Amino acid sequence: MTVTELVPYEDALASYDPVMGLEVHVELGTKTKMFCGCSTELGADANSQTCPTCLGLPGALPVVNAVGVESAIKIGLALNCRIAEWCRFARKNYFYPDMPKNFQTSQYDEPIAFDGYLDVQLEDGEVFRVEIERAHMEEDTGKSTHVGGATGRIHGASHSLLDYNRAGIPLIEIVTKPITGAGERAPEVAKAYVAELRELIKALGVSEARMEMGQMRCDVNLSLRPHGTETFGTRSETKNVNSLRSVERAVRYEISRHAGVLNAGGKVVQETRHFHEDDGSTTSGRIKEEAEDYRYFPEPDLVPVAPSREWVEELRATLPELPRVRRNRLREEWGVSEHDMQSILNAGAVDLIVATTEAGADSAAARKWWMGELARSANESGTELSALPITPAQVARVAALVAEGALNDKLARQVIEGVLAGEGDPDAVVEKRGLKVVSDDSALGAAVDEAIAANAAIADKIRAGKVAAAGALVGAVMKATRGQADAARVRELILEKLGVEG
């Protein structure tokens, strides 16, 4: 299937209904692995965080990570799932070089959480309910690095390197039920679901859920069925999609690709596919196995997990305010529209604005700086807002200096520029660059006199009653003082010197 054979997206939706299934893997932020005591800290030398258990050596026995189980229960509760009173682990058998045991310890027909839902809000305010099939515990694989090829994949590589530090890190896999009824908005629904799930995971504190670091990744299952039919088509599974934008693009591409295959009289192959960030396309990976191909059987070395109802309710009581509820509360407190709140959310600025208000700024000022000057800086540098080298406390201090009259907006932007450049806290930048607003009459008087003398015609208009013309003189004084004059006081002085009432 080539790109030229793709059916235009709108044409595909005119003939077919998309059916999606999203499988999201979340790496838990535990200090040790799921079944052994090895560290999960990032950045260690390759294969330095391994032991006989996570390497699957003979005689080594696993022990379940209690924090991992607790995190799984919290996720299940936040997703409105039922929590199993009794569940167990299973062995999922398949051979890959990055699976040192030749099986993955997972859960199969007895997951710890099941039958839930997550409501997600689309950009126009519509709420779409995504039903959750299950959330189960398992372990991550190691990491393969393919060397010598042009693409970084195994095809064409001269050799591969294996790092088992990641093997055994706790994972929660969250699987949706088939998502139907989204129609042309299927890509938007997929993106909104993964975004909402990421915010929920972060709010629970069980993972940082940084997709760019592989801490959260999505497998996109998609099939098409002709309008008016109920039978699902053959699905493809695009693996390990690691950004919100890519989830949306993968769904859109696969809809067009499937339609192209079906319109040409072909049959969609049930397979895994790779997503390509550069052009948003997918390419074939391997034929997709069915569950029976994995030869699941109960893990004989682990006892079942049977969380008591008392423990589950204790964990339920610890759940934080969930993201959608919190956003609605903040939107009302801040007095912003649904559209503006969505923009704040898309920019990743909600927590930054909250932290800035907690540091003393009012919410309007916090929104102004994060969504204005700082968003511009983030866009120009190609980074996330939260990655900018400025803290909410520093932004709050800039807002305070503006509120006090020590800075105007132009000077405040220069202060922010200095902080981002590593020149220190806002007060240090103000001192170093000499950026304080000049407001005393003695310092401003001479500049006002010069402006009046240099613009006699404008001064005459003001004397004649055209007070609005004072803006031109204010501008001249601001230019002469490099923007540091107190504009309001300058206007008052101009009118006083010209004998005009404001």
Image (tube, rainbow, N blue to C red):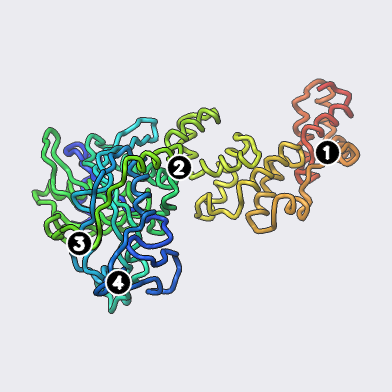
Q: CA distance from mark 1 to mark 4?
A: 70 Å
Q: Which residue is mark 1?
A: 439
The mark nearer the N terminus, 4 or 3, is 4
- As drawn, the label of residue 346 is 2
Amino acid type, mark 3: Pro
Type of the residue with mark 2: Asn
Name the quadrant containing residue 183: top left
N-terminal label among 2 and 3: 3
Outermost left residue: 265
**Residue at screen point 34% across, 52% down:** 69
- Report the mark closest to the observer, 1 or 2: 2
Residue at image x 34%, y 35%? 119
- C-alpha span from label 1 to label 2: 39 Å
Residue 72: x %, y % from top left: 34, 49
Residue 312's quadrant in the figure? top left
Q: Counting residues from the N terminus, which is met first, the one under dot 1 or under dot 2? A: 2
Look at discs 2 and 4 and give the one toward the viewer: 4
| Residue type beneath disc 1 | Ser
Q: Provide the secondary structure element on which disc 4 rests.
A: loop
Mark 2 secondary-structure assignment: helix
Is residue 142 in view from this perspective? Answer: yes
Earlier residue among tags 1 and 3: 3
Residue under numbered circle 4? 55
- Tell me which residue sits at (32%, 49%) in the image: 247
The spot of residue 273 in percent (x, y) is 23, 57
Give the residue at x 32% y 46%: 248
